[in-house]
Amino acid sequence: AGPPRAGTDARTAFARPGWPGGPIGRAGAPGAPGDTALPLFRPHPAAAAERLRGEDVVYVTGGSTANMPAVWELHGVGGALREAWGRGAVMAGVSAGAICWFGGLSNSLGAGWAPVAGIGLVAGGFCPHADSDPRRLEASRLVERGAMPPTLAVDDGCAVHLAPGAPARALTA
């Protein structure tokens, strides 16, 4: 089916036969306890961190790489995400939602490109959209100057599978 289009609601994008439980969740029927979406921009995001603690898969959409980690820490989600990673949950994302696991290059801070911190689950940096905008060239310059750590640059429509103790694998659609 290919990756979801920008602006597609995750529940709609992943609502297909055989998909286990939803965009964030455990195997089971849609609507089961593991089928969880976690919006943080609504009034009183009750128990956000607690809702993540039992999840097996976390998928983060794009957005502002500069803002996501700050909002997560404010709501106690950063620690819950680090706990999930530590117990082996699958952490996935697209664009800013992929940068957040590492750190990387973002245009979230104004004109131009700047390195931003993610939540540090994976060492190094991440550069999405490497084939579709000038970010790859800027990432190379920053890495060469020592302003960014060694960085994975990934083209649109591609992914990188990382697992502790295993070599990185590149995947394409």
Image (cartoon, rainbow, N blue to C red):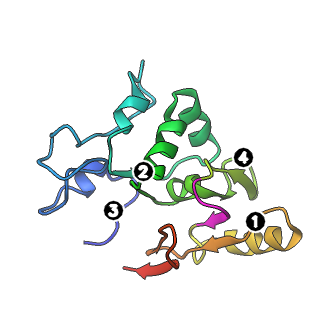
Q: Which residue is drawn at 76% across and 56% down?
A: 114
Numbered disc 1: secondary structure: loop
Residue placed under numbered mark 3 in the picture: 4
Residue at the spot of label 2: 87
- Alpha carbon separation for disc pair 4 and 1: 19 Å
Distance between mark 3 and mark 1 Cα atoms: 30 Å
Instruction: Identify which residue is drawn at 62% across, 74% down.
Output: 153
Q: Is the C-beta separation of discs 2 and 4 under 8 Å?
A: no
- Whole-Å distance between the Cαs marked 4 and 3? 26 Å
> Mark 3 or 1, which is nearer the eye?
1
How many numbered discs sit on the rendered protein? Answer: 4
Q: Mark 4 points at which residue?
A: 109
Type of the residue with mark 1: Pro
Q: Give the range drawn in magenta.
A: 121-127
Which residue position holds label 1?
149
* Mark 2 to mark 4 CA distance (whole Å): 32 Å
